[in-house]
Image: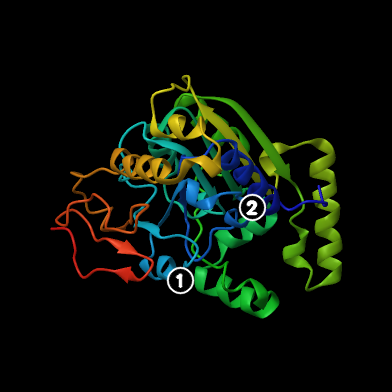
Protein backbone atom coordinates (compact mmCIF):
# COMPACT_ATOMS: atom_id res chain seq x y z
CA UNK A 1 0.00 0.00 0.00
CA UNK A 2 2.72 2.52 0.95
CA UNK A 3 5.97 0.99 -0.28
CA UNK A 4 5.93 1.46 -4.06
CA UNK A 5 4.42 4.17 -6.21
CA UNK A 6 2.43 2.99 -9.22
CA UNK A 7 4.50 5.24 -11.48
CA UNK A 8 7.63 3.36 -10.42
CA UNK A 9 5.98 0.01 -11.04
CA UNK A 10 4.74 1.30 -14.41
CA UNK A 11 8.26 2.17 -15.59
CA UNK A 12 9.61 -1.25 -14.69
CA UNK A 13 6.71 -3.21 -16.20
CA UNK A 14 6.76 -1.32 -19.49
CA UNK A 15 10.54 -1.64 -19.80
CA UNK A 16 10.34 -5.35 -19.02
CA UNK A 17 7.88 -5.88 -21.87
CA UNK A 18 9.91 -3.79 -24.32
CA UNK A 19 13.10 -5.66 -23.39
CA UNK A 20 11.54 -9.02 -24.16
CA UNK A 21 11.83 -8.58 -27.92
CA UNK A 22 13.47 -5.96 -30.15
CA UNK A 23 11.68 -4.43 -33.12
CA UNK A 24 8.41 -3.69 -31.35
CA UNK A 25 6.08 -0.77 -32.11
CA UNK A 26 5.41 0.98 -28.79
CA UNK A 27 2.88 3.82 -28.48
CA UNK A 28 3.23 6.04 -25.42
CA UNK A 29 -0.10 7.84 -24.93
CA UNK A 30 0.31 11.18 -23.20
CA UNK A 31 4.02 11.07 -24.03
CA UNK A 32 4.29 14.78 -23.36
CA UNK A 33 7.61 16.06 -22.11
CA UNK A 34 9.12 12.76 -21.02
CA UNK A 35 9.30 9.02 -21.66
CA UNK A 36 9.74 7.66 -18.12
CA UNK A 37 10.36 4.02 -19.02
CA UNK A 38 13.02 4.74 -21.64
CA UNK A 39 16.02 4.78 -19.21
CA UNK A 40 15.17 1.18 -18.28
CA UNK A 41 15.01 -0.10 -21.87
CA UNK A 42 18.16 -2.02 -22.81
CA UNK A 43 18.20 -1.10 -26.52
CA UNK A 44 15.94 1.92 -27.17
CA UNK A 45 16.98 2.19 -30.81
CA UNK A 46 15.95 -1.41 -31.39
CA UNK A 47 12.26 -0.46 -31.09
CA UNK A 48 9.95 2.08 -32.67
CA UNK A 49 8.72 4.22 -29.77
CA UNK A 50 6.06 6.79 -30.68
CA UNK A 51 4.90 9.49 -28.27
CA UNK A 52 1.28 10.61 -28.68
CA UNK A 53 -0.07 13.72 -27.00
CA UNK A 54 -2.81 16.28 -27.60
CA UNK A 55 -0.36 19.14 -26.97
CA UNK A 56 2.29 20.05 -29.56
CA UNK A 57 4.04 22.18 -26.93
CA UNK A 58 4.40 19.21 -24.60
CA UNK A 59 5.81 17.05 -27.39
CA UNK A 60 8.25 19.74 -28.46
CA UNK A 61 9.75 19.58 -24.97
CA UNK A 62 10.26 15.81 -25.23
CA UNK A 63 13.88 15.21 -26.24
CA UNK A 64 13.77 11.49 -25.39
CA UNK A 65 12.07 10.32 -28.59
CA UNK A 66 12.11 11.40 -32.22
CA UNK A 67 8.73 10.00 -33.26
CA UNK A 68 5.87 12.21 -32.09
CA UNK A 69 2.19 12.34 -32.98
CA UNK A 70 -0.30 15.01 -31.96
CA UNK A 71 -3.67 13.32 -31.55
CA UNK A 72 -6.61 12.96 -29.17
CA UNK A 73 -6.48 9.46 -27.69
CA UNK A 74 -10.25 9.52 -27.06
CA UNK A 75 -11.18 10.62 -30.59
CA UNK A 76 -13.04 8.19 -32.91
CA UNK A 77 -9.74 6.47 -33.73
CA UNK A 78 -5.99 6.76 -33.38
CA UNK A 79 -3.89 7.49 -36.50
CA UNK A 80 -2.48 3.95 -36.67
CA UNK A 81 -3.37 1.01 -38.84
CA UNK A 82 -5.48 -1.71 -37.30
CA UNK A 83 -3.50 -4.47 -35.56
CA UNK A 84 -0.15 -2.72 -36.12
CA UNK A 85 1.05 -1.90 -32.59
CA UNK A 86 2.69 -4.24 -30.07
CA UNK A 87 2.36 -2.19 -26.89
CA UNK A 88 0.20 0.79 -25.87
CA UNK A 89 1.02 2.46 -22.56
CA UNK A 90 -0.02 5.52 -20.59
CA UNK A 91 0.81 7.07 -17.24
CA UNK A 92 -1.76 9.29 -15.49
CA UNK A 93 -3.64 9.92 -18.74
CA UNK A 94 -6.98 8.13 -18.44
CA UNK A 95 -8.32 10.48 -15.76
CA UNK A 96 -7.82 13.38 -18.20
CA UNK A 97 -9.68 11.77 -21.13
CA UNK A 98 -13.31 12.67 -21.67
CA UNK A 99 -14.27 9.27 -23.11
CA UNK A 100 -12.35 6.19 -22.00
CA UNK A 101 -14.77 3.90 -23.79
CA UNK A 102 -13.49 5.38 -27.06
CA UNK A 103 -9.90 5.17 -25.78
CA UNK A 104 -10.13 1.45 -25.04
CA UNK A 105 -11.76 0.85 -28.42
CA UNK A 106 -8.82 2.66 -30.01
CA UNK A 107 -6.36 0.51 -28.07
CA UNK A 108 -8.12 -2.68 -29.13
CA UNK A 109 -8.19 -1.57 -32.76
CA UNK A 110 -4.52 -0.54 -32.94
CA UNK A 111 -3.05 -3.48 -31.01
CA UNK A 112 -2.22 -6.62 -32.89
CA UNK A 113 -3.45 -9.96 -31.50
CA UNK A 114 -1.29 -10.75 -28.50
CA UNK A 115 -0.41 -7.07 -28.04
CA UNK A 116 -0.47 -5.55 -24.56
CA UNK A 117 -1.73 -2.40 -22.90
CA UNK A 118 -0.50 -0.95 -19.61
CA UNK A 119 -2.24 2.06 -18.09
CA UNK A 120 -1.95 3.67 -14.68
CA UNK A 121 -4.47 6.25 -13.51
CA UNK A 122 -6.02 7.98 -10.51
CA UNK A 123 -9.42 6.70 -9.48
CA UNK A 124 -12.73 8.54 -9.56
CA UNK A 125 -13.96 7.88 -6.02
CA UNK A 126 -10.89 8.56 -3.88
CA UNK A 127 -11.21 11.68 -1.67
CA UNK A 128 -8.67 13.80 -3.56
CA UNK A 129 -10.34 12.91 -6.89
CA UNK A 130 -13.78 13.80 -5.56
CA UNK A 131 -12.41 17.14 -4.40
CA UNK A 132 -10.79 17.69 -7.77
CA UNK A 133 -14.14 17.08 -9.46
CA UNK A 134 -16.00 19.47 -7.16
CA UNK A 135 -13.83 22.55 -7.53
CA UNK A 136 -13.01 24.44 -10.76
CA UNK A 137 -9.74 23.57 -12.45
CA UNK A 138 -8.36 27.07 -11.90
CA UNK A 139 -8.94 26.69 -8.16
CA UNK A 140 -7.40 23.22 -8.20
CA UNK A 141 -4.28 24.52 -9.93
CA UNK A 142 -4.00 27.35 -7.40
CA UNK A 143 -4.29 24.96 -4.45
CA UNK A 144 -1.71 22.68 -6.05
CA UNK A 145 0.75 25.55 -6.45
CA UNK A 146 0.10 26.60 -2.87
CA UNK A 147 0.42 23.25 -1.12
CA UNK A 148 2.43 21.11 -3.60
CA UNK A 149 4.47 23.44 -5.82
CA UNK A 150 6.82 20.56 -6.70
CA UNK A 151 3.97 18.91 -8.64
CA UNK A 152 2.94 21.94 -10.67
CA UNK A 153 4.74 20.95 -13.87
CA UNK A 154 3.15 17.50 -14.04
CA UNK A 155 -0.24 17.95 -12.39
CA UNK A 156 -3.18 20.31 -12.54
CA UNK A 157 -4.55 19.43 -15.98
CA UNK A 158 -8.36 19.20 -16.28
CA UNK A 159 -9.55 15.80 -15.09
CA UNK A 160 -12.80 14.00 -15.93
CA UNK A 161 -12.23 10.58 -14.30
CA UNK A 162 -14.47 9.02 -16.95
CA UNK A 163 -14.84 5.32 -16.03
CA UNK A 164 -11.68 5.61 -13.92
CA UNK A 165 -12.40 2.93 -11.36
CA UNK A 166 -11.87 -0.80 -11.13
CA UNK A 167 -15.24 -2.25 -12.13
CA UNK A 168 -15.72 0.16 -15.05
CA UNK A 169 -12.22 -0.51 -16.38
CA UNK A 170 -12.76 -4.26 -16.11
CA UNK A 171 -15.95 -3.92 -18.15
CA UNK A 172 -14.14 -1.90 -20.83
CA UNK A 173 -11.46 -4.58 -21.11
CA UNK A 174 -14.02 -7.36 -21.43
CA UNK A 175 -16.10 -5.41 -23.97
CA UNK A 176 -13.07 -4.80 -26.19
CA UNK A 177 -11.74 -8.34 -26.22
CA UNK A 178 -8.85 -8.17 -23.74
CA UNK A 179 -7.80 -11.09 -21.60
CA UNK A 180 -5.55 -11.87 -18.64
CA UNK A 181 -6.22 -8.52 -17.01
CA UNK A 182 -3.99 -7.80 -14.02
CA UNK A 183 -4.81 -4.96 -11.62
CA UNK A 184 -2.47 -3.40 -9.06
CA UNK A 185 -4.10 -1.07 -6.54
CA UNK A 186 -2.66 1.78 -4.52
CA UNK A 187 -4.80 2.98 -1.63
CA UNK A 188 -2.47 5.65 -0.29
CA UNK A 189 -3.82 9.03 -1.40
CA UNK A 190 -3.39 10.87 1.91
CA UNK A 191 -0.18 12.45 0.63
CA UNK A 192 -2.31 15.08 -1.13
CA UNK A 193 -3.36 16.32 2.32
CA UNK A 194 0.02 16.31 4.07
CA UNK A 195 0.07 20.11 4.29
CA UNK A 196 -2.22 19.86 7.36
CA UNK A 197 -1.33 17.06 9.75
CA UNK A 198 -4.77 16.43 11.36
CA UNK A 199 -6.34 16.12 7.92
CA UNK A 200 -3.45 13.96 6.72
CA UNK A 201 -3.84 11.63 9.72
CA UNK A 202 -7.58 11.36 9.02
CA UNK A 203 -6.90 10.47 5.39
CA UNK A 204 -4.29 7.86 6.36
CA UNK A 205 -6.92 6.23 8.56
CA UNK A 206 -9.37 6.28 5.66
CA UNK A 207 -6.79 4.74 3.32
CA UNK A 208 -5.97 1.98 5.80
CA UNK A 209 -9.66 1.16 6.21
CA UNK A 210 -10.35 0.99 2.47
CA UNK A 211 -7.20 -1.09 1.95
CA UNK A 212 -8.13 -3.46 4.77
CA UNK A 213 -11.65 -3.93 3.39
CA UNK A 214 -10.26 -4.30 -0.15
CA UNK A 215 -12.80 -1.88 -1.63
CA UNK A 216 -11.19 -1.72 -5.03
CA UNK A 217 -13.51 0.92 -6.50
CA UNK A 218 -12.31 3.30 -3.75
CA UNK A 219 -8.60 2.83 -4.44
CA UNK A 220 -6.52 5.94 -4.97
CA UNK A 221 -4.84 4.63 -8.11
CA UNK A 222 -4.75 1.60 -10.39
CA UNK A 223 -2.25 0.03 -12.75
CA UNK A 224 -3.89 -2.27 -15.29
CA UNK A 225 -2.20 -4.63 -17.72
CA UNK A 226 -4.06 -6.76 -20.26
CA UNK A 227 -3.49 -8.58 -23.52
CA UNK A 228 -5.52 -8.40 -26.70
CA UNK A 229 -7.01 -11.76 -27.59
CA UNK A 230 -5.25 -13.71 -30.32
CA UNK A 231 -1.87 -15.30 -30.82
CA UNK A 232 1.47 -13.84 -31.87
CA UNK A 233 2.35 -14.78 -35.42
CA UNK A 234 5.87 -15.18 -36.72
CA UNK A 235 5.63 -13.11 -39.90
CA UNK A 236 6.07 -9.52 -38.72
CA UNK A 237 9.23 -7.41 -38.79
CA UNK A 238 9.47 -7.56 -35.01
CA UNK A 239 9.55 -11.36 -35.17
CA UNK A 240 12.41 -11.35 -37.64
CA UNK A 241 14.27 -8.92 -35.42
CA UNK A 242 13.55 -11.10 -32.40
CA UNK A 243 15.36 -14.01 -33.96
CA UNK A 244 18.65 -12.07 -33.89
CA UNK A 245 20.69 -10.86 -30.97
CA UNK A 246 20.89 -7.07 -30.64
CA UNK A 247 24.54 -7.07 -31.62
CA UNK A 248 23.71 -8.88 -34.89
CA UNK A 249 20.82 -6.73 -36.07
CA UNK A 250 22.54 -3.70 -37.65
CA UNK A 251 21.09 -2.66 -40.98
CA UNK A 252 18.51 -5.46 -40.93
CA UNK A 253 16.93 -4.02 -37.79
CA UNK A 254 16.92 -0.51 -39.26
CA UNK A 255 15.14 -1.87 -42.32
CA UNK A 256 12.68 -3.78 -40.13
CA UNK A 257 11.84 -0.68 -38.12
CA UNK A 258 11.28 1.36 -41.26
CA UNK A 259 8.93 -1.37 -42.44
CA UNK A 260 7.20 -1.25 -39.06
CA UNK A 261 6.68 2.50 -39.50
CA UNK A 262 5.04 1.96 -42.86
CA UNK A 263 2.79 -0.74 -41.47
CA UNK A 264 1.93 1.08 -38.26
CA UNK A 265 1.02 4.55 -39.47
CA UNK A 266 -2.11 5.33 -41.42
CA UNK A 267 -1.12 7.11 -44.63
CA UNK A 268 -4.59 8.02 -45.86
CA UNK A 269 -6.43 8.97 -42.65
CA UNK A 270 -7.91 12.47 -42.84
CA UNK A 271 -9.63 13.53 -39.64
CA UNK A 272 -9.62 16.65 -37.53
CA UNK A 273 -8.72 14.88 -34.29
CA UNK A 274 -5.30 13.92 -35.66
CA UNK A 275 -4.36 17.40 -36.71
CA UNK A 276 -0.61 17.04 -36.78
CA UNK A 277 1.90 14.28 -36.57
CA UNK A 278 5.63 13.84 -36.20
CA UNK A 279 7.59 10.83 -37.32
CA UNK A 280 11.08 10.01 -38.45
CA UNK A 281 12.17 6.63 -39.72
CA UNK A 282 15.07 4.77 -38.14
CA UNK A 283 17.43 6.40 -40.62
CA UNK A 284 16.26 9.91 -39.74
CA UNK A 285 14.24 10.68 -42.89
CA UNK A 286 10.65 11.83 -42.88
CA UNK A 287 8.08 9.15 -42.17
CA UNK A 288 5.63 7.78 -44.76
CA UNK A 289 2.66 10.05 -44.03
CA UNK A 290 1.38 12.12 -46.90
CA UNK A 291 1.99 15.84 -46.45
CA UNK A 292 -1.70 16.57 -47.04
CA UNK A 293 -2.69 14.39 -44.12
CA UNK A 294 -0.46 15.59 -41.30
CA UNK A 295 2.51 17.52 -40.10
CA UNK A 296 5.82 15.71 -39.84
CA UNK A 297 8.12 16.27 -36.93
CA UNK A 298 11.48 14.97 -35.91
CA UNK A 299 13.52 15.93 -32.91
CA UNK A 300 13.84 19.48 -34.25
CA UNK A 301 10.17 20.40 -34.40
CA UNK A 302 7.02 20.46 -36.54
CA UNK A 303 6.96 21.54 -40.15
CA UNK A 304 4.60 24.34 -41.14
CA UNK A 305 1.79 22.30 -42.65
CA UNK A 306 -1.70 21.33 -41.60
CA UNK A 307 -4.28 18.90 -42.88
CA UNK A 308 -7.15 20.28 -44.91
Camera-nearest label, 1 or 2: 2
Q: Quadrant of the C terminus?
A: bottom left
Tell me how far mark 1 sits from mark 2, CA to CA: 20 Å
Residue 146 placement (x, y as % from top left) = 66, 80
**Front position in the image: 297 or 111:** 297
Residue at 79 percent across and 43 percent down: it is 210
Left or right: where 62 falls relative to 69: right
Residue 180 placement (x, y as % from top left) = 60, 24
Applied colour scheme? rainbow
Q: Give the SS element for disc 2.
A: helix
> Where 39 sits versus 261, above or below?
below
> How many other residues sit within 10 Å of disc 1, few (<14), some (14-19) or many (≥20)?
few
Residue tagged by mark 2?
40
Does label 1 or label 2 sit earlier along the sequence?
2
Left or right: where 11 falls relative to 45: right
Residue tagged by mark 1?
61
Residue 69 placement (x, y as % from top left) = 35, 56
Left or right: where 266 falls relative to 59: left
Residue at 55 percent across and 37 percent down: it is 245
Tell how many labels: 2
Amino acid sequence: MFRQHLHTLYKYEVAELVNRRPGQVVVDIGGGKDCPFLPFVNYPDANLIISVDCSPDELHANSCVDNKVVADAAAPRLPFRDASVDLIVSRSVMEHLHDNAAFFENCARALRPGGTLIHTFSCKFSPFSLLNQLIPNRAARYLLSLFHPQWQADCGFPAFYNRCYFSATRRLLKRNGFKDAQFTFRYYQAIYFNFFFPLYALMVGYDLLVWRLRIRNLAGGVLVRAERRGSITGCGPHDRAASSKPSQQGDDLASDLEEAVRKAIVSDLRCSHSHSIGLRSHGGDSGPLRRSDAVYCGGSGFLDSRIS
